[in-house]
Image (tube, rainbow, N blue to C red):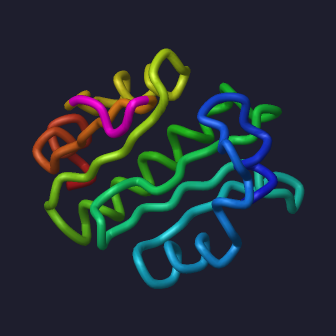
């Protein structure tokens, strides 16, 4: 997963050491759940939902595998699971003017302001998810 996270060209980490393997394990095993997409025994995408903070901690696809539907599949599986656990609104942040920003808008996320100086904050409510995905809720 770290290889994928550090390969992306948007929403890059200012310092890759800020996100450790232990952080990933904590978010997957203790705080929420994670999903990976593998091709030929190689992780090419992953997503992690944080049930404690009600946010999407990660959703990344290796640039070599862009535009193959991997991100949307991971996104939908993650939100299906999330809303099967709770009806709490979930949030995420992403840099403005990125493909990720457009991805979340198309997927039905609502921009609610800024998370930080350099990131937009988006929300997905249970009701919007259910409306867009009636078979999932």
Determine which quarter of the picture holds residue 120.
top left
Determine which quarter of the picture holds residue 102.
top left
How many circles with numbers are drawn on the protein? 0
The residue sitting at the top extreme is 97
- Please report the residue visible at 50 percent of the width from the left and 73 percent of the height from the top: 27
Looking at the image, residue 124 sits to the left or right of residue 50; the answer is left
Looking at the image, residue 26 sits to the left or right of residue 49; the answer is right
Q: If the image is split into quadrants, where does the N terminus sit?
A: bottom right
Residue 103 x, y percent position in the rendering: 46, 26
Residue 33 x, y percent position in the rendering: 47, 71
Q: If the image is split into quadrants, where does the C terminus sit?
A: bottom left
- Please report the residue visible at 32 percent of the width from the left and 69 percent of the height from the top: 51
Viewer-side residue, 84 vs 34 = 34
Q: Decide whether the magenta segment is chiefly helix, strand or loop.
A: strand
The residue sitting at the right extreme is 40
- The stretch drawn in magenta includes residue 8: no
Residue 117 x, y percent position in the rendering: 39, 31
- Please report the residue visible at 82 percent of the width from the left and 33 percent of the height from the top: 64
Looking at the image, residue 37 sits to the left or right of residue 75; the answer is right
Looking at the image, residue 97 sits to the left or right of residue 88; the answer is right
Residue 126 x, y percent position in the rendering: 15, 50
The residue sitting at the front extreme is 117
Q: Which residues are magenta?
A: 113-117
- The stretch drawn in magenta includes residue 116: yes
- Please report the residue visible at 23 percent of the width from the left and 29 percent of the height from the top: 113
- 115 over 74 or under it: above or below: above
The residue sitting at the left extreme is 127
């Amino acid at each position: 997963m770290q290889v994928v996270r550090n390969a992306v060209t948007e929403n890059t980490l200012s310092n890759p050491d800020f996100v450790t393997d232990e952080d990933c394990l904590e978010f997957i095993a203790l705080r929420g759940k994670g999903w990976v997409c593998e091709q030929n025994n190689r992780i090419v995408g992953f997503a992690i939902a944080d049930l404690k903070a009600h946010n999407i901690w990660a959703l990344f696809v290796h640039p070599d595998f862009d535009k193959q539907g991997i991100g949307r599949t991971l996104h939908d599986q993650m939100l299906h699971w999330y809303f099967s656990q709770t009806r709490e609104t979930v949030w995420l942040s992403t840099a403005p003017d990125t493909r990720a920003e457009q991805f979340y808008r198309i997927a039905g996320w609502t921009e609610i302001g800024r998370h930080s100086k350099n990131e937009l904050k988006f929300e997905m409510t249970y009701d919007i998810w259910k409306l867009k995905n009636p078979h999932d809720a």
